[in-house]
Amino acid sequence: MKIIAVDDERLALENLVSAVKKYDKNADITPFRDPKAALEHIETEPCDVAFLDVQMFGMTGVELAQKIKEVAPSVNIIFTTGYSEYMKDAFEMHASGYLLKPVTVDKVRKELENLRTPLSKKKARVKFQCFGNFEAFIDGDILKFKYLKTKELLAYLVDRRGAGCSSGEIMSILWEDEDHDSYLRNIRKDLVDVFNEKGCGDVIVNNWGKISIKADAVECDYYNYLRDKTSENYHGEYMVQYSWAEMTNAYLYNLD
């Protein structure tokens, strides 16, 4: 679920973001104190829900909602305010919801579980198979790389579930030493190139010298197992072609 939160009062904005995260720790929420910056963001980035403070400097929440609806009609607008007299404006805007401050987790839950426009669940194009041998797919096709180590690098990033991995960490796992800088640059480029060519470049994240995958943008039997603690496909084997995966396999095997 992608969410924006807009409020020019810092503490109120922090409280709203905290309440949303407590309701759904995986929620992708982007906060803004500037309504114009929020509008620029939503013009290029898809969004499911927009929490908008009604009274803001420079642009009211109602004005911002009108502009958002022009560029993204399906966005669920939820107004937040300390004053109930603005409810009429919210109803006229066909807003999804209306939160009276202070915002609480229970209030957020009530609104997000009763959205005017239900969220459509999109099938992930990228799929990882971790039980048994590791395999990676895009649109059902097995990914092929220039180097064997590229696939192992991808497997390790999947194992790390979105955590950023440094070059030193990766080399210590893939080669058990740190004397492969040139080779690592080649396999990182191979990984990025393959995902870009398939139109899924956003799944691979490069930040501050680290590399990771965007875990919430993929389908993965390992992630499903961690969430549901059940899987018909797990039979005590996890990424069996990689020795470094034995620790994760032991953890999975001992889960209740």
Image: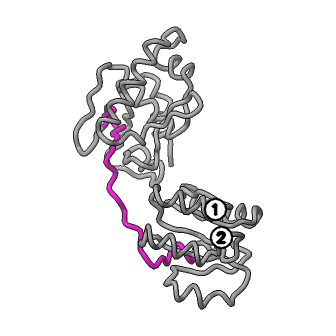
Residue at position x 53%, y 57% in the image: 41
Residue at position x 47%, y 48% in the image: 226
Q: Position of residue 169 (x, y in %)?
A: 56, 22
Q: In front: 27, or 83?
A: 83
Q: Position of residue 218 (x, y in %)?
A: 39, 47
Residue at position x 38%, y 39% in the image: 201
**Alpha carbon separation for disc pair 1 and 2:** 7 Å
Label pair 1/2, CB-CB below 8 angstroms: yes
Q: Residue furthest left?
A: 141
Disc number for residue 77: none
Type of residue at label 2?
Val
Q: Tell me where the magenta segment starts and ends, as one range.
A: 110-136
Q: In front: 7, or 179?
A: 7
Disc number for residue 105: 2
In the rendered image, the vertical position of residue 25 relative to residue 125, given as above or below: below
- Determine the image quadrant of residue 25: bottom right
9 displayed left or right of 183: right
Q: Position of residue 1 (x, y in %)?
A: 48, 61
3 displayed left or right of 224: right
Disc number for residue 22: 1
Residue at position x 46%, y 35% in the image: 159
